[in-house]
Image (cartoon, rainbow, N blue to C red):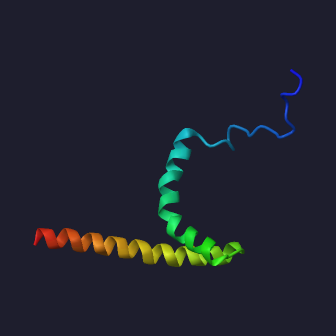
Amino acid sequence: MAGTSTNAPMPSAEEAPTRCQALARIPLRIFRAPGTLAANRLGAKLEDDRMMIRTLIDMLFWNIVFVIGAAIIFTRIG
């Protein structure tokens, strides 16, 4: 069939993500979103810099979320 071939190689079965792997990446992207957004906003280009910013922001953000969530839950119980 003329015009339908591409020069890009097809990924092997080991390289192509399965549907389960693709679905497993969604929670990971949500979990890492605050740090990724902060790294993008700060304009970090080097991967080491981005990783440090993501780690810091993700820890701070999710700690605050869980502390507020726990405070809400325990104030309603007690």
Residue furthest right in the image: 2
The number of numbered discs placed on residues in the rendered structure image is 0
Residue 23 image position (x, y, % from top left): 51, 45
Q: Is residue 71 above or below residue 31?
A: below
Residue sitting at x 33%, y 71%: 66
Where is residue 67, by image quadrant? bottom left
Image point 53% across, 52% down: which residue?
25
Q: In the rendered view, does 2 fall on the left or right side of 61?
A: right
Q: Is 33 left or right of 45, judged from the image as shown?
A: left
Residue 39 occupies which quadrant of the picture? bottom right
Name the spot of residue 72 as percent of width and height, x first. 22, 71
Taking the image as shown, residue 59 lies to the left or right of residue 10, namely left
Q: Quadrant of the C terminus?
A: bottom left
* Residue 57 pos. (x, y %): 50, 76
Residue at 85% across / 30% down in the picture? 5
Q: Can you say which quadrant of the picture contains the N terminus?
A: top right
Q: Using residue 44 as the reference point, say whether residue 73 is left or right of it.
A: left
Q: Going by the picture, which residue comes out furthest to the front?
A: 41
Vertical placement of 22 versus 52: above or below?
Answer: above
26 up-or-down from 5: above or below:
below
Extreme-top residue of the structure: 1
Q: Residue reaching furthest left?
A: 78
Q: Which residue is pictured at 61% across the width and 74% down the height?
A: 41
Residue 43 to residue 8: above or below: below
